[in-house]
Amino acid sequence: MTRLCILKSALSVAVTAALVTMAPAAQAAWEPTKAVEFVVPAGTGGGADQMARLIQGVVIKYKLMKEPMIVVNKSGGAGAEGFLDVKGSKGDPHKLVVTLSNLFTTPLATGVPFNWRDMTPVSMMALDNFVLWVNAETPYQTAKQYLDATKAAGPSKMKMGGTGSKQEDQILTVGIEKATGTKFIYVPFKGGGEVAVQLVGKHIDSTVNNPIEAVAQWRAGQLRALCVFDDKRMPYKAKITDKQSWYDVPTCKEAGVPTTYTMLRGVFMAPGVTKEQTDFYVNLLKKVRETPEWKDYMEKGAFNQTSMTGDDYVKWLGKAENDHRELMKEAGFMAK
């Protein structure tokens, strides 16, 4: 073999080796290069905050990404502060936001210039249930008994407590009124914990709190769960009280109250990010949902564990927005 051939052969081997070495680097998937800000468009201690901090803790515990995740609460304007911050961070892949149904209700009720399409949908993590609660010392054993008593008492005699005004709890209360011909005095409070305390103290007659917001008082025998506003019973069969599990609570349809409502627990990114960047978080959150910590959280909070990504998630969001618009129009809650 001539010297020229030997040189060509050596050069070919070197180039091939270099390409093999470089190939993984060229194909490496995107990942964060600095701290990821996880925005909560609500105050500390609420359901959205709890979920964001659980996700943060799981990511840290299992080292699901190299960079830190920092939870930041931006609750001003019924969550508008947080949503507008993410909307204004176009192209920034280091910012996430956890959402609840104020994703729809806040812009519809306030007219703030924001829509869920102004962000990038990543993943529906779960749906939060609502339960009709009464004080355990009252005689009402079923939803029908309570609503019949509400009708008999006359218009605006019974008080329904809830979190916020023109938000999920009040929208659901209006839905109950329209479905059953009842009429409540709606009393707003700052959070679900306060709502539960007010019901225990008999300052209000009922609430539509999320399971996790009233489970302690239910377990203690202070509150009674009458029905869940989902189209199927909660699947959790472990006893919470001496006699009942979440599964033992009938759906409101079963109990003669033809009303359903669940609340989104989802994650979005800023607008203008790439598919590769979005896919990183889709896969990250899939790993979070597979951990025992997440499964325990889902059961303790009696969540509907529906999850979605991609086109399915986008279609669900569009329908949910239309449903909220119709409910809020009927209730007179739309911004003028």
Image (spheres, helix red, strand yellow):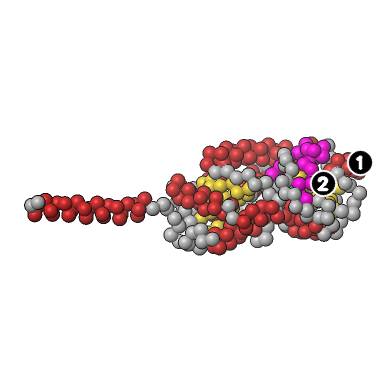
Q: What is the three-letter code of the residue carrying label 1?
A: Ala
* Residue 22 horizontal side relative to residue 39, left or right: left
Please state which of residues 98 and 217 is positioned toward the viewer in this rendering: 217
Tell me what residue is drawn at x 84 percent, y 57 percent.
221
Q: Point out residue 290 in the picture as x, y percentages from the top left corner.
A: 58, 52
Q: Is residue 242 visible?
A: yes
Q: Residue at point 35% right, 53% down?
A: 24
Q: Residues within 10 Å of mark 2 (few under 14, many from 20)?
A: many
**Quadrant showing the C terminus:** top right
Q: Which residues are magenta?
A: 245-263
Q: Nearer the viewer, residue 307 or 166?
A: 307
**Residue 130 position in % (x across, y down):** 73, 47
Q: Secondary structure at mark 1?
A: helix
Q: Residue 274: percent from the left, percent from the top? A: 44, 47
Mark number for residue 152? 1
- Name the outermost residue toward the left: 2
- On whether residue 102 falls in the magenta region, the answer is no
Q: Look at the magenta stretch and give its main secondary structure.
A: loop
Q: Point out which mark residue 226 bears.
A: 2
Q: How many marks?
A: 2
User: Residue at point 51% right, 61% down?
Assistant: 63
Q: Amino acid at mark 2?
A: Leu
Residue ranking furthest to the front: 1
Q: Would you say residue 248 sits in the magenta stretch?
A: yes
Number of residues whose C-alpha sits closer than 10 Å to that of mark 1, classed few (under 14), some (14–19) or many (20 or more)? few
SS class, disc 2: strand
In front: mark 2 or mark 1?
2
Q: Which mark is residue 24?
A: none
Residue 305 position within the rendered picture, expressed as x and y whole percent measured from the top left: 65, 47
Q: Is residue 169 visible?
A: no
